[in-house]
Image: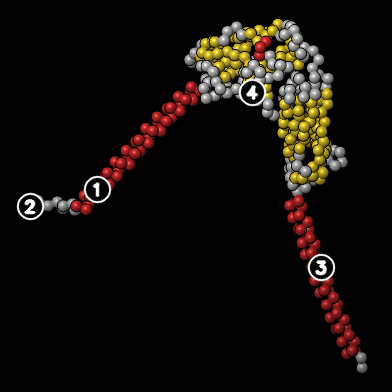
Amino acid sequence: MPKKLPKKSPKRVKKTTATNLNFKVFFLILLIAALFFTVFFILLSQIQAQTNVPLTVAPARQELMIKPGEKSAVIIKFLNQGTEPVSGAVKVADFIVEDNEGSPTFLEGPTQLAPRFSAASWVELPFDQITIAPKDKVLIQAKINAPADAQPGGRYIAIYFEPGGSVSESTISANKEAVTPVAIRIAGLISIRVAGPVEETAYVVQMKAPRFLEYGPIPIKTQIMNRGNYHIKPKGTLSLLSIFGKQVDQQFLKEQNIFPDVARTYDNQLGQKWMFGKYKIELNASYGETGKVLTAVVFTWVFPWKITLIIVLAIIIIILLFATIFHRIKKREEMLEEKVEELEEKLEEKKQP
């Protein structure tokens, strides 16, 4: 007779069905999550491809000397390194630098800038709309007409390309693409010098260093203000001197433009980790065509008090330890001497009749 197969209990059937159902639900959730992340990364890559338009400008910065009433021109080159043509507007705007990092800010309103620094109205562009073919460039020759009554000093303008229309942001760094919620801008910055005697006035606003440090190097923050009417580029050194006047360290001041009515901050570090005593920090710099001088001095102390305290305590402990040992040895010697004297006295007593 054929053997009868054992019947599955209802509990086991229900358990197997529930396990299969749970596995199907888990697999479905995993599939939906995978589809979601795939779509997300596709959209993200498309957004990045739209915002990272491969545009560059050359030259990023230019300087131009012009006489009052004179006409001149500059050439700006916009390059499209992408694989698609890019169309947009070409515009000009004054710019100023308001922070101590040197970041330019566009000023597009006609009354936003004092007349002594404005020159956007001097510029004539050949066209206001361009299309840059892929792997190609477009040259813009901008004509500059200085008024006959233009005052000597600096004027600062930006000629920029704006793909796709207008934007609400007005801040951009030189030779960098500034991504905004609507579009981007790529700009060439032009510093115009109107011929004639310029006002050169600058001073050290502050020079800070900690009054006390446990370890070096010493952080130094220097801020220089330009109150003239043309940008300057101070050159000089920061020197670290010991209390005896010996030079311990020296660094050159980073050469960077300081625009009119702007203070620029310099961060330096002087010295090594292990230093001890009072130190003098000196700034010696010059700026402008006549080599005007900037000087400042600050003092600081460097004292590794924790290490010094440990060393002093260790010395004291060693001295006390040696003193204790010496005292014990001396006491033992005295005790031995007393015993020897007692023995000698006893021997003398025995010798007497």
Q: Is residue 124 visible?
A: yes
The residue sitting at the left extreme is: 1
User: Vertically, is 265 above or below 144?
Assistant: below
* Residue designated by label 3: 326
The image quadrant that residue 67 belongs to is top right
Left or right of residue 47, residue 218 in this image: right
Q: Quadrant of residue 294?
A: top right
**Which element carries disc 4, helix, strand or loop?**
strand
Local SS, label 1: helix
The numbered mark, 1 or 2, whose residue comes first in the sequence reads: 2
Q: Which quadrant of the structure image shows residue 171? A: top right
Disc 1 versus disc 3: nearer the observer: 1
* Residue under numbered circle 1: 16
Residue 96 vs residue 109, the one in the foreground = 109
Residue at mark 2: 1
Expressed as whole percent of the image width and height from the top left, the position of residue 353 reads: 92, 93
Residues at discs 1 and 3 in contact (Cβ within 8 Å): no
Residue that protrudes farthest toward the bottom in the picture:
353
Q: Spatial distance from mark 3 to mark 2, Cα to Cα?
A: 108 Å
Q: Of circles 4 and 2, which is in front?
A: 4
Looking at numbered disc 3 in the image, what kind of residue is underneath it? Phe
Of pointers 4 and 2, the one earlier in the residue sequence? 2
